[in-house]
Image (cartoon, helix red, strand yellow):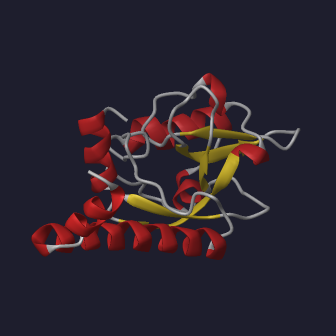
Amino acid sequence: MDARKLWKKLNEGWIGILFSIFLGIVFATFFYYVVLATAFQTTLPVVAVVSSSMEHRNPELTHYSWLNKAFNYDRKTIDSWPVPNGFLIGDMPVVQGTSEYSVGDVVVYRVQEQPAPIIHRIIKINGDGTYQTKGDNNLSQLSYELSVKKEQVYGKVIFIIPKLGYVKVLAAQIFGI
């Protein structure tokens, strides 16, 4: 079938309606993503949470106690940080790029050996300007969390849209992404 016949078939009847809807969704998604990336000054303005590392299942053990032992942070300080209650699988954090990050910020960054961006909290700024991060629900830090460079960071989480990321979570599970 040549391209003209295929194009005509894709634009007729129910197939045409579904094809137009699909193209509209793809175009709108791309357009909004570009607009958000420009507005929020990052190449990754939204992400879907696919792991439980920022959940607060047992915050006394994995969050408060760990931070108190490792860095002597008290509960009042920890509770004053942005995103104090973490977030869940399927939530969609909105990310803002900035030139400065602080202890307590939840940041999205890339790690070469990881297929997906990491979403963890900055728990210390090292003397060389790199960041130490940790997932609120993790029992300890991983090796790549001890020295995250500013160039690796897409931005910090400024707010969370609950459950909107489930579309990506389901696609990842179905297609093994």
Q: Is residue 63 left or right of residue 19?
A: right
For residue 166, which quarter of the picture? bottom left
Q: Is residue 163 visible?
A: no
Relative to 114, does residue 12 appear above or below in the rendering?
A: below
User: Closer to the camera, 79 or 117?
Assistant: 117
User: Closer to the camera, 24 or 100?
Assistant: 24
Residue plotted at (40% across, 41% down)? 60
Relative to 173, does residue 13 appear above or below in the rendering?
A: below
Residue located farthest toward the right when viewing the structure as drawn: 128
Q: Is residue 158 left or right of residue 131?
A: left
Residue plotted at (37% across, 46% down)? 55
Question: Count the marks: how many?
Answer: 0
User: Closer to the camera, 147 or 6?
Assistant: 6
For residue 91, which quarter of the picture? bottom left
Q: Quadrant of the C terminus?
A: top left
Residue 143's x, y, as percent?
Answer: 63, 23
